Image: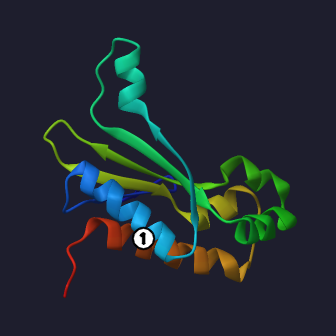
Amino acid sequence: MTIEGLITIASSFATQDTLARLENEIAAFGLTVFARIDHAAGAAAAGLVLRPTVVVIFGNAKGGTALMQITQTIGIDLPLKMLVHEDGGGKTWLSYNDSRWLAARHGIIDAPMTEKLAVMLSQIAFNATQHDPR
């Protein structure tokens, strides 16, 4: 499902398993995990309740710099991020920004790296959320 540049897919795994698989996939693509923001832990620290909601921030300087050389405003959307979250029924979901949407948002036209990035993010998301066919 894509809504206004946001792609959301169901995971076949529990939240913690999806997060572990996501971080493994990010590393397998040669990217670096810069941070993990656990919104549920933050909510708990404030005395509030929130279902599992974790943002994983990742990327690499080579790809990010190339995009920012085209237009620096894309830096507001970099590094890349994916959100792993659990709905009220206990189902885990993974959401991320469509790189094509990000490129359009910042006026980047005909950048081959945008399509390559879209394919890579799709593969990372798929591998993190779907059962291995092996």
Marks counted in the figure total 1
With 3 as the anchor, is 91 left or right in this view?
left
Query: Where is residue 37 shown, x and y percent of the image?
Result: 48, 39
What coloring was used for the rendering? Answer: rainbow
Q: Residue at x 74, y 65 (%)?
A: 61
Quadrant occupied by the N terminus: bottom left
Query: Where is residue 134 shown, x and y percent of the image?
Result: 19, 88
Residue furthest out toward the bottom: 134
Query: Where is residue 42 shown, x and y percent of the image?
Result: 43, 24
Q: Which residue is drawn at 74% across and 55% down?
A: 74
Graded by Cα atoms within 10 Å as few (under 14), some (14 to 19) or many (20 or more), the crowding at tag 1 reads: some
Query: Where is residue 44 shown, x and y percent of the image?
Result: 34, 20
Above or below, 121 against 53 in this view is: below
Q: Residue at x 59, y 74 (%)?
A: 117
Residue 108 visible, this angle: no
Above or below, 46 against 111 in this view is: above
With 109 as the anchor, is 79 left or right in this view?
left
Above or below, 28 against 37 in this view is: below
Type of amino acid at the residue the image marks with label 1:
Glu
Residue furthest out toward the left: 89
Question: Which residue position holds label 1?
Answer: 25
With 18 as the anchor, is 122 left or right in this view?
right
Residue furthest out toward the top: 47
SS for dot 1: helix
Residue 124 visible, this angle: yes
Q: In which quarter of the image is residue 21?
A: bottom left
